[in-house]
Image (spheres, rainbow, N blue to C red):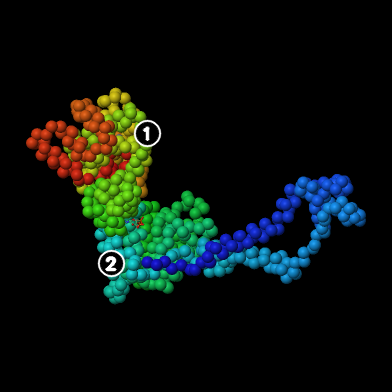
Amino acid sequence: MQEVQPPKKPMAFYYILVLAVILMFNEMARPYFDQAQIEQVDYSQFMDMTESQQIGKVEIKDNQIIFVDQDGKKYKTGVTNDPQLVQRLHDSGAEFTQDIKEETSPIVSFFLAWILPLIIFFAIGQYFSRKLMERGGGANGMFFGGGNSQAKIYVPSSEGIHFKDVAGEDEAKENLSEIVDYLHNPKKYSSIGASMPKGVLLVGPPGTGKTMLAKAVAGEADVPFFSIAGSEFVEMFVGMGASKVRDLFKQAKEKAPCIVFIDEIDAIGQKRNGANMGNDEREQTLNQLLTEMDGFEGNTGVIILAATNRPDSLDPALLRPGRFDRRVPVELPDLKGREAILAVHGQKVRLASDVDFHTVARMAAGASGAELANIVNEGALRAVRNGREVVTEADLEESVEVVIAGYQKKNAILSDKEKHTVAYHEIGHALVAALQSHSAPVQKITIIPRTSGALGYTMQVEKQDQYILTKEELENKIATFTGGRAAEEVKFNQVSTGAANDIEQATKLARAMITRYGMSEDFGMVAMETVTNRYLGGDTSLACSAATQEQIDRQVVALVREQHEKARKLLADNMEKLDELAAYLYEKETITGDEFMKILKGEETAAEAEAREDAEERAKSSTPVVDPEHHKYNLA
Ligand code: ADP
Ligand code: ZN
């Protein structure tokens, strides 16, 4: 789509203006700077020097005499009433002149003194008043003239975004296609007496394609698209936001049928409460929005789409029927969706024949559409860095890791002893995972430090997306988290700081099991915690008595401790394998799940070969979990 914006005066105009002002001041100030450097002497010294014929050139001005000595040094002195000066100078043989008054033409001097400053002031004034008007000075129309809202208008064009550009998200598309149909043929709906919802709220985590979907609705329906971010309404001056809302709706009604898209509507639509004093501006803006939405009739053809990732913070008045009464969830893509999104973005780069989006999609469990787009782009950048002309599977797999854990740190920063510790730590995770049933196969283990601060990590990849987890699976996950620390303990009989992130994740999971998933004997099916911010990190808030909190804490500790014990026992019973694998990893720095399984199985019997093949089959399938910084890739 093309964006239509009012023409602007070129920036160069203002640069030239500023330059002119600087030059003018420079010209005026120069004589003062020059004179500051000249030494001032008494008139008597001037006379002495004249007498002894020490001076060269002399310049007599209105109020001072500037002269140079034989060495070319400059002096100045005042003018006194000295009729013999000229004679004496002549006698001494000095070269002298009287200043000629330069007659500037009166027209030029009038222009310089009066007209030019006026022009400059006028231009500066214009610039600032325009700035103010751009910022939506409509409310104070008396001062600034009619204000313009900042809503950008997109006119439909053939190269706009369509539903086919938004991969996955089939439910959302299905939901929105009704609106497209309505915009195509409103009669069909009005004749039966049905009216379209005025507002549709797109709800979901960041980067899942909400903006894209809104544009696609406009693209499919071939109608103009107005877009504005909620934060743009919130202005410094009270009333300006409200006037922007008015303008926006006025424009929209003129252009109907059309789509108005308000991004991040939570910026203005937050719950109003008495406690928030000093938020007049936001409240007025919201009130105006509510009024405007009530003001237009159902079937005018203006459809308002709004996006937010904090639906629970929205004011109930905004959500009542007649306003944003329809909610379209735009969730993180599932495996199939991820594959489709990768394919859409893969079209924009040159791909090698070995690229398998299915594998990449499996590795990138939990990634949003925006992150997947980034993964493809990172892969392409890596290909360029390595001097290749096509993007390979390895590029994409590496870029998944870059997005998860950051870039590899090139120069070794670990001491030999530390590297040993990290190797045992990572093998500890992998081994505990492999020795338990129901845990995701290990895909890759590495001890190359990453820029995220991770010194190494173990990547487990689920065969497919998991929507529910059993209690046993969760317990195994906790055991796997503790596996790193457990390995350090059984091998070196000491503990290190390396397990901080594991501890955090294990605790979070154990807490959730007890307070939210009803997996504790004592509490049964009672929720002790509720998730408050589902789409942004999933913060929780406690809702129980202080005594219960204590009990929860004790149970969390017990649960994690139990799994930690289990992990320690598993590793102690398999000490030889732990040593062998850790030595191998220390040597190679990065090993695949296949290699790991081969060593774990040792010499192959026929049954083992089959078991291995089976395991490899599983290992090939690919959710990075376990080690560092990645709660969001977990189901926890
Ligand atoms: P949101 O508004 O939900 O935060 P956007 O619509 O701005 O997310 O998406 C950001 C970028 O991510 C898009 O420009 C697009 O490149 C990519 N993207 C996100 N979701 C999808 C999807 N379902 N299909 C294709 N690309 C997507
Ligand atoms: Zn760890």
Q: In this view, does 254 lie to the left or right of 174?
A: right
> x and y percent of residue 208 in the render?
32, 55
Q: In this view, does 541 lie to the left or right of 146?
A: left
Q: How many labels does the image show?
A: 2
Residue 622 appearing in the image: yes
Residue 195 appearing in the image: no
- Please give the name of the residue rendered at 88% of the width and 48% of the height, measured from the top-left corner: 51
Instruction: Read off the residue under disc 2.
Output: 178
Quarter of the figure with the N terminus: bottom left
- Please give the name of the residue rendered at 71% of the width and 58% of the height, measured from the top-left corner: 28
The numbered mark, 2 or 1, whose residue comes first in the sequence reads 2
Instruction: Read off the residue under disc 1.
Output: 413
Secondary structure of the residue carrying tag 2 is: helix
| Front one among 92 and 261 | 92
Q: In this view, does 76 lie above or below 214?
A: above
Q: Residues within 10 Å of mark 2 (few under 14, many from 20)?
A: few
> The disc labelled 2 sits on which kind of residue?
Glu
